[in-house]
Amino acid sequence: MAASGGVMRKVMRGAAVLALAGCAAVVGACRTNPTTGRSQFQALSRDQEIALGVQASPQMTSEFGGKVSDAQLQAYVEGIGRALAARTEADNPKLPWEFTLLDSDVINAFALPGGKVFITRGLAERLTNEAQMAGVLGHEVGHVTARHINDRMAGQMGVGVLAVIAGAAANSEAVSDAAAQLGNIALLSYSRDEEHESDLLGMRYMSRLNYDPRGQMEVMQILAAASKGPRPPEFLSTHPYPADRVKRIGSLLAGEFKATQNNPQYGLYPERYQPILARLKALPPARHRAMNGGPEGVALGAPGSWCLHCAAAESARSGER
């Protein structure tokens, strides 16, 4: 996943530059996020987040093999994604949402700021019902609506880092290098609590569409099964262990989402997914292949999984420049 790590560094370098360019205007500006109820420092404006997503989306799509060529499959993913986005809070439904099925056999899904959401066919082929698909996409929608990239940027805008970048103002290359380091620091400190928050938000959005949020737990169980191997996946160093997330989701199902359980109004809809699964399996080999020779190598072993934060963290660990 070295290539995707390169894209991520560019995304976060741009994020740092945009954030710093507007720093004087936003210092001290905190607003309550209507999605989470938390007060957030506005390191990036909404327009800046959208601009970053628009800028990075084409290269990200290309580096993961491009879009799956089957228009029906693309429409299926787009339809579920947009239905979820329409159930988000405040002005979030007005974001320029896009949901893309990538022609890659890695098990992967991630979101760019501003509403660009991706899932690979490698993950889609592991799913068994439509509620699981809604869980994956809802989790990524949650990263966007909770503005987790904004939080990473705000959390790392220390005086020392800002001084380094300000001191290099006469040298554009130095500014870019410093900004890239700021982005990598933010990604390396990505919070497990934010992953749990996205699980919660995904369950919230999918249940608003009458999907059984147990589908979110089933996705974690699929990831847990995929993570078994001779060495612990690096994915697990930046995300909670799937088993831990299963436990947390189980608590939510017994609490906040109790009314959805054993309730015929909420379904997993495996019958809707079977034709989709058949179309996926009939596709020609993926253009983008797992690094380690197959699905076992997946993004779990080279962490670009679930969101953009992990790919950049992987690049920083490997010393890639």
Image (spheres, rainbow, N blue to C red):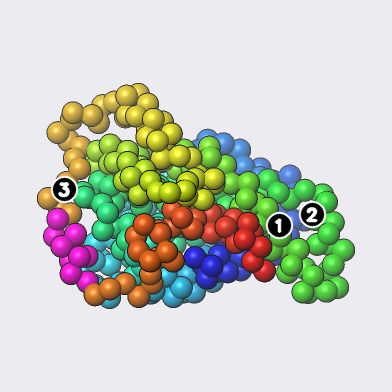
Is residue 278 located in the magenta-colored stretch of the structure?
Answer: yes
Quarter of the image where one finds residue 261: top left
Residue 161: numbered disc: 2
Residue matched to label 1? 182
Q: Are marks 1 and 2 in contact (CB under 8 Å)?
A: yes
- Quick one: label 2 or label 3, which is nearer the N terminus? 2
Quick check: is 38 in the magenta stretch?
Answer: no
Is residue 82 among the parts visible in the rendering?
A: no
Total marks placed:
3
Q: Position of residue 225 (x, y in %)?
A: 33, 45
Magenta residues (range): 274-283
Residue 199 can be seen in this image: yes
Left or right, 248 with respect to 161, comes to left
For numbered disc 3, what is the local secondary structure? helix
Left or right, 55 with reference to 155: left
- Mark linked to residue 270: 3
Residue at 77% in and 68% down: 175
> Residue at image x 38%, y 66%?
293
Amino acid type, mark 2: Val
Label 1 neighbour load within 10 Å: few <14, some 14-19, many 20+: many
Amino acid type at circle 1 is Leu
